Image (tube, rainbow, N blue to C red):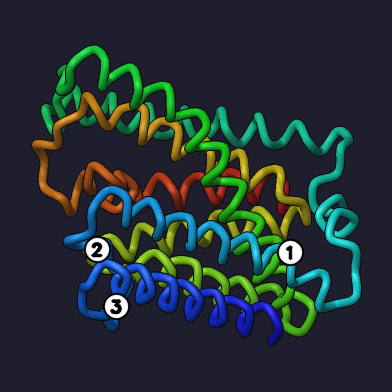
């Protein structure tokens, strides 16, 4: 399938870019994508390669199908009443995650305190809205606007969603990470985002849900300290990875299905 082929090509480009950066700095080439041991400048260069690879797939997919790029994504992001689903999804994701944090705070599973100086804290918080917007838009264009949309052209919705769910979750572990047990949370989140795209056939609701989750996760990260066990409350970088988070994602998927899946 075209989209899967483009994703594989993007992964290969990321590895080639990382290898070039390592060779230019007299470091050995690695088989896995990883920023371990890289300087700040090297990590920034690696992020540029990653972003260019994602942008390349987003642009190349409609072109390879003989379609205008702007026209293709305009159909997935219609500027009509459906655009309000983005704000609704954002608000719902923030609400669900805030309830989780409140429950964990009340049961002493997390504690909040200021962990950084004023200057660093201000810089981190200022970057949160942009990170949430860019991260959600980039991943939704790639994994729902390209991958899932392509799969839906040749498969029924259920198998298409299952494949896209697994590939989206697996993509978060292509690079070396500290934790792999968070996979279940990524699968649950991916299932929610894929299902909402199928139900609405636009990217607005998935983008809103995705951005809301990133926004509150990054916004609380400078303050929160996790006390409870990981299987219950997840990890600071991904609170949906624990049992409570997975349950919340399942309930949210049901709620979205009741609203949009009819």
Give whichever of discs 1 and 3 has the lower sequence position: 3
Left or right: 142 as drawn, with respect to 253: right
Q: Position of residue 185 (x, y in %)?
A: 35, 57
Is 258 above or below relative to 110? below
Give whichever of discs 3 and 2 has the lower sequence position: 3
Q: Residue furthest top?
A: 118
> Residue at 27% of width from left, 32% of height from top?
221
Q: CA distance from mark 3 to mark 2?
A: 11 Å
Is 119 above or below relative to 56? above
The secondary structure type at the circle numbered 1 is: helix
Quadrant that contains the N terminus: bottom right
Left or right: 143 as drawn, with respect to 156: left
Q: Position of residue 92 (x, y in %)?
A: 54, 32
Q: Give yes or no for contact between labels 1 and 3 (Cβ–Cβ under 8 Å).
A: no
Q: Position of residue 216 (x, y in %)?
A: 40, 31
Q: Which residue is mark 3?
A: 32
- Quadrant housing residue 35: bottom left
Q: Nearer the viewer, residue 195 or 70?
A: 70
Between disc 3 and disc 2, the foreground one is: 3
Q: Which residue is mark 1?
A: 59
Q: Which residue is mark 2?
A: 177
The secondary structure type at the circle numbered 3 is: loop
- Quadrant housing residue 56: bottom right
Q: How many marks?
A: 3
The secondary structure type at the circle numbered 2 is: loop
Q: CA distance from mark 2 to mark 1?
A: 28 Å
Left or right: 112 as drawn, with respect to 243: left
Give whichever of discs 2 and 1 has the lower sequence position: 1
């Amino acid at each position: 399938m075209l989209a899967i082929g483009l994703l594989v090509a993007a992964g290969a480009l990321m590895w080639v870019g990382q290898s070039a950066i390592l060779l230019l700095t007299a470091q050995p080439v690695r088989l896995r994508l990883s920023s371990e041991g890289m300087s700040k400048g090297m990590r920034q260069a690696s992020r540029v390669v990653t972003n260019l690879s994602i942008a390349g797939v987003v642009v190349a997919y409609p072109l390879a199908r003989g379609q205008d790029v702007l026209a293709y994504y305009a159909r997935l992001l219609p500027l009509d009443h459906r655009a309000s689903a983005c704000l609704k999804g954002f608000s719902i994701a923030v609400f669900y995650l805030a309830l989780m944090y409140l429950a964990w705070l009340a049961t002493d599973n997390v504690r909040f305190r200021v962990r950084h100086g004023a200057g660093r804290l201000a810089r981190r918080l200022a970057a949160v809205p942009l990170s949430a917007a860019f991260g959600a838009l980039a991943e939704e264009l790639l994994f729902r606007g390209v991958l899932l949309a392509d799969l839906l052209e040749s498969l029924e919705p259920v198998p298409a969603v299952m494949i896209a769910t697994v590939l989206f979750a697996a993509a978060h572990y292509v690079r070396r990470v500290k934790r792999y047990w968070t996979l279940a949370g990524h699968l649950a989140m991916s299932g929610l985002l894929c299902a909402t795209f199928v139900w609405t056939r636009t990217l607005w609701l998935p983008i809103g849900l995705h951005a809301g989750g990133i926004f509150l996760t990054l916004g609380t990260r400078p303050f929160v300290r996790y006390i409870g066990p990981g299987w219950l409350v997840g990890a600071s970088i991904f609170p949906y990875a624990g049992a409570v988070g997975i349950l919340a994602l399942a309930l949210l998927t049901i709620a979205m299905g009741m609203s949009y899946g009819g």
